Image: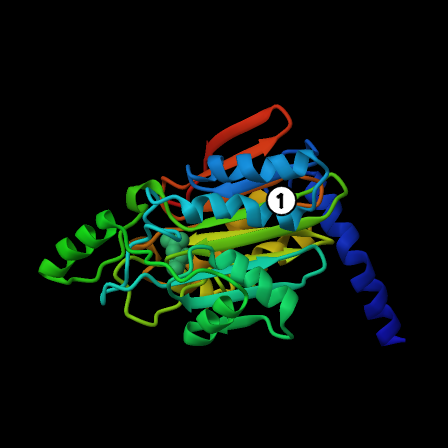
Amino acid sequence: MLRRHLLKLSAGVPAVFSALSSLGAFGRQDETTRRPIVVSTWDHGQAANEAAWKILVNNGRAVDSAEAGVRVTEADPSVSTVGFGGFPDRDGKVTLDACIQDETGNCGSVAFLQHVKHPVSVARKVMEETPHVMLVGEGALQFALEQGFKKENLLTEKARKAWDAWLEKAEYKPVINIENHDTIGLLALDAQGRMGGACTTSGAAFKMHGRVGDSPLIGAGLFVDGEVGAACATGMGELVIKTVGSHLVVELMYQGHSPRSACEQAVRRIAAKLPDYKDFQVGFLALNRKGQYGAFCIQPGFTYAVRSGELNRLSRSDSLL
Ligand code: ASP
């Protein structure tokens, strides 16, 4: 009797949440539905979206558009936080983290990978060619070479000079909104309603050798639930890992929050749990199955790019501080 009552109660929960959410109980909700659509983090998201959009507009699959989009950022030597041209760790080594996830929840990831320009494509191979989700370090490099990826020097002159300058004091201090570009996380919903996402980074500049952030961790830097929505994170990865940020955002959307409200709640969770949050930036970006999107961050300064049909814009996220 009691069990039946509880089951009845819990069956009513999603209905209550969706009623509350349509009343705006969980914050501003953009009710416009858009498909296909791609959203991605920071100013450099615009160029990534452009490449992703070409696939989406030709009826392509969301996960393919996500990979193609972030590859643009990985290859761009002017972006000092992703792929080729990324700032090195404190030992002068460029070490990369990336992951990818499709509409079925299938995913692949690499971490602490050196010498390969497109870690997201290695992550995709892990997803499709191995029984595993994640490969790291030497093992990831060995796998990449076996798969035909080229071994390259990823340390550009600009990055080497920045490292030289850093060595003078060798003081490790994360810089908030470094040069306004950071990890790229990209989320897509294709014309057929499939979702996909990718996240790729060189991580925190001058990090300890071997440090891995949130970006390659499914649930932390990226999470895609094809039935609900997708989320990605940027900023100080340690804070995101401690709160399993992207999974939390998607779970909040499942409970009825709008993408923007879900991102805000996840930032508030960080603020409630981690006393030093004011010293760091974390930004979340989310997209739901209807093509509604939103973002929220700790510090002002986080931007995200949106592309859908005629809509092609760079927006500034609301912030906690
Ligand atoms: N989240 C990334 C990391 O902690 C870096 C960033 O987005 O700034 O490795």
Residue 152: percent from the left, percent from the top? 37, 59
| Residue with the most extreme left position | 168
| Amino acid type at image mark 1 | Ala
Location of residue 255 by image quarter: bottom right
Q: Is residue 217 above or below residue 63?
A: below
Q: Quadrant of ligand 1?
A: bottom left
Instruction: Locate residue 3 relative to residue 51 in the image: left or right.
Output: right
Q: Residues within 10 Å of mark 1 (few under 14, many from 20)?
A: many
- The one nearer the camera, 254 or 225, is 225
* Quadrant of res 97: bottom left
Residue at horizontal 47%, vertical 36%?
Answer: 47
Q: Please indicate, yes or no, whether residue 59 appears anywhere in the rendered image.
A: yes
Q: Secondary structure at mark 1?
A: strand
| Residue with the mark numbered 1 | 188
- Residue 230, compared with residue 239, is above or below; it is above
User: Residue visible at 64% across and 39% down?
Assistant: 55
- Locate the N terminus and report the quarter of the image it occupies: bottom right
Q: Position of residue 154 (x, y in %)?
A: 33, 56
The quadrant in which residue 219 appears is bottom right
